Amino acid sequence: RHLQWLAPPLLRLGEYGLALWLGWRTGPVALGAVYAALAAIAFHHYDIVYRLRHQNMAPPRWVTRAGGGWDCRMVLLLAAALAQAFPPVTAAMAVWCAVLYVTDSVRSWAAVAVAEHREPATAGTAVRADDTRADDSREQD
């Protein structure tokens, strides 16, 4: 239980490491596609963290399903390598993930910007109207 926090980084290490290893084994032509795929996936991972931190919500389930998750992506990359179709499959995965994740991220953050524009007094904060602080209620001598 004390090491549960290690699960996500270890999964990322496995996924990124497998993609890099397969790309290296396939040859230089595959490394550009691997880089593009990992850039799109890493973007999504950072978006998840910042979306949870600033919006207090995760991406929609359909985005997670459409992106395949780490396990599906690893199986896809292994199958592509075994079928000797690693570069085109990895390039297609990179384009798919980039379009999916960037589109969803832009939609989500644009909705936050619109909401903040409509309610500027409460943008980014959760302050109640009846929130009074002890410092504000002290009388000046």
Image: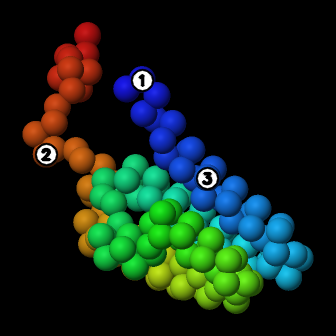
Q: Answer above or below: position of 61 versus 56.
A: below
Residue 86 drawn at (x, y percent)? 71, 81
Q: Mark 2 belongs to which amino acid?
A: Ala
- Considering the numbered disc 1 on the image, is that residue within a helix, a strand or a loop? loop
- Among the 4 quarters of the image, the one containing residue 61: bottom left
The local crowd at label 3, few if under 14, some if 14 to 19, many if 20 or more residues have their Cα within 10 Å, is some
**33 with respect to 137 (left or right):** right
**38 with respect to 75 (left or right):** right
Residue 7 drawn at (x, y percent)? 48, 41
* CA gap, disc 3 and disc 1: 21 Å
- Kindly tell me whether residue 74 is visible in this rendering: yes
Residue 64 drawn at (x, y percent)? 38, 70
Task: Quadrant for the N terminus, please.
Answer: top left
Q: Answer above or below: position of 85 versus 116.
A: below
Judging by the rendered image, the residue that carries numbered circle 3 is: 14
The local crowd at label 1, few if under 14, some if 14 to 19, many if 20 or more residues have their Cα within 10 Å, is few
Q: Mark 1 belongs to which amino acid?
A: His
Residue 5 drawn at (x, y percent)? 46, 35
Q: Mark 3 belongs to which amino acid?
A: Gly
**31 with respect to 68 (left or right):** right
Q: Answer above or below: position of 31 versus 6.
A: below
**18 with respect to 60 (left or right):** right
Q: Residue furthest top?
A: 141
Q: Residue furthest left?
A: 130
Judging by the rendered image, the residue that carries numbered circle 2 is: 129
Which disc number belongs to residue 2? Answer: 1
